[in-house]
Image: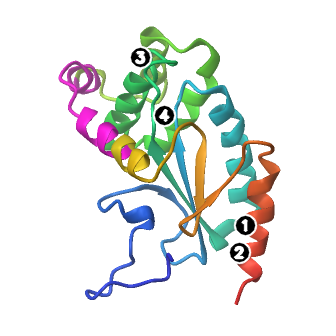
Amino acid sequence: MNDEIDDNGDPVHPAGLPGSEHEAGSVYSPVTLVEYGDYECPRCMQAQLEVKHLLDAFGEQIRFVFRHFPDGAAHPHAELAAEASEAAAAQGKFWEMHELLFRQTMHMSQAGIMRDAEAIELDMTRFRAELADHVYLQRVREHHAAGVRLGLRGTPSFFLNDVPIDVSFSLETLEKAVRFALTEP
């Protein structure tokens, strides 16, 4: 999937969502793992640890893409956290904010999000203004809508080379699936 090239010679984006991605690893990696996640979801916090393990273990053989799938009904700060990660991305610090947001999953608050932004030394005037104006809300909602079109109902939801991976019983399933994908011809 991620080694597919379009007519212009550019890599095809996983799961059909064009545009800039929050990704770790090379677009030319043989394996692409896409997560639809929610910063206030305890299982997503656990999944993040497994994803970090996979990135360390497989290096350039794996590309990781994170997409927002906030559940506002269950997690009242999830959409704000997703917007905050996008505002951090605009300042070149998505992954730093991503990691800090998952550290506060169990006690997410607007004040905590602001502390995280200060901790990674964002331009706070810009950050506050972009959150107040919901500059990145449309992007967050586009990610969510893409997930809904894919039939997602909850988080974390994973796709490995565009194939859904069921992690409802164990996150170890991810590592097994990556190992299998790397052995396929």
Label 1 vs 4, first from the N-terminus? 4
Badge 4 density bin: few <14, some 14–19, many ≥20, Cα 10 Å:
many
Q: Secondary structure at mark 1?
A: helix
- Asked if 164 appears above or below 70 in the picture, the reply is below
Q: What element does badge 3 sit on?
A: helix
The mark lying in front, picked from 1 and 3, is: 1
Instruction: Tell me the distance, in whole angstroms, between the alpha carbons under discs 2 and 1.
Output: 5 Å
Coordinates of residue 178 in the picture (x, y in percent):
72, 66
Seen in the image, is 7 located left or right of residue 171?
left
On the rendered structure, is 60 left or right of 8?
A: right
> CA separation, marks 2 and 4?
30 Å
Magenta stretch, overall SS: helix
Q: Earlier in the sequence, mark 1 or mark 3?
A: 3
As shown in the figure, which amino acid type bears the numbered disc 2? Answer: Ala
- Magenta residues? 126-143
SS for callout 2:
helix
Inter-mark Cα distance, 1 to 3: 36 Å
User: Dot 3 surroundings within 10 Å: few (below 14), some, or many (20 or more)?
Assistant: some
Earlier along the polypeptide chain: callout 2 or callout 4? 4
The amino acid marked with disc number 4 is Met
Please state the horizontal and vertical placement of residue 159, each as a whole percent of the image: 58, 59
Residue, disc 4:
97
The residue that label 3 is drawn on is 114
Query: Residue 181 shows which numbered tag?
Result: 2
- Closer to the camera, 111 or 41? 41
For the residues bearing labels 2 and 1, Cβ distance under 8 angstroms: yes
Please tell me whether mark 4 sits on a helix, a strand or a loop: helix
Image side of residue 13 versus residue 116, left or right = left
Q: Could you tell me residue 95's position as x and y percent? A: 50, 43
The C terminus sits in image quarter = bottom right
Q: Mark 3 belongs to which amino acid?
A: Met
Q: Whole-Å distance between the Cαs marked 2 and 3?
A: 39 Å
